Amino acid sequence: MPDQPNPTLGVRLKQLRKERGLSQEKLALDAEVTISTLSRIERDATDPRWSTLNKITEAMGINLLDT
């Protein structure tokens, strides 16, 4: 069985957001980022700054340093 490719950062963030039952609007509000920023990240249209990624993952209850 072939290995599955690793999802991109944006795809993985979107998966995690949906698993947690969060809308883009709710996550953006909790993470203090704009909806358009979150959308661009999830579509891999931009690479987030570390600080932005940290805000998003903290809002989802994920600690990047523990992964």
Image (spheres, helix red, strand yellow):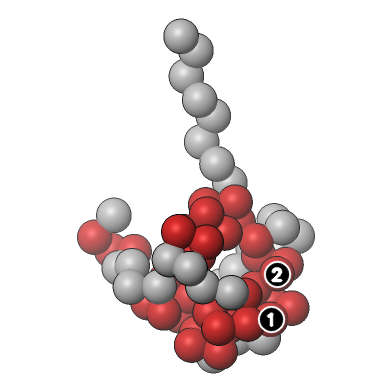
Q: Which mark is residue 3?
A: none
Identify the image quadrant of residue 64: bottom left
In this rendering, is residue 42 above or below 61? above
Q: Marks 2 and 1: CB-CB under 8 Å?
A: yes
Determine if residue 54 is in view: no
Which residue is found at the position 50% from the left and 85% from the top?
Answer: 31
Secondary structure of the residue carrying tag 1 is helix
Q: Position of residue 10 (x, y in %)?
A: 60, 56
Identify the image quadrant of residue 55: bottom left
Which residue is found at the position 56% from the left and 89% from the top?
Answer: 29
Q: Position of residue 4 (x, y in %)?
A: 50, 25
In this rendering, is residue 7 above or below 12? above
Q: Is residue 38 left or right of residue 13?
A: right
* Nearer the observer, 29 or 18: 18
Amino acid on which the number 2 mark rests in the picture:
Ser
* Nearer the observer, 46 or 6: 6
Find the residue positioned furthest to the left: 66
Name the residue that disc number 1 marks.
35
Q: Position of residue 6 (x, y in %)?
A: 51, 36
Determine if residue 28 is in view: yes
Amino acid on which the number 1 mark rests in the picture:
Ile
In this rendering, is residue 41 above or below 24? above
Secondary structure of the residue carrying tag 2 is helix
Which residue is found at the position 29% from the left and 54% from the top?
Answer: 67
Which residue is found at the position 55% from the left and 41% from the top?
Answer: 7
Find the residue positioned furthest to the top: 1
Spatial CA span between label 2 and label 1: 6 Å
Name the residue that disc number 2 marks.
39
Crowding near the residue tagged with mark 2, few <14, some 14–19, many ≥20 C-alpha atoms within 10 Å = some
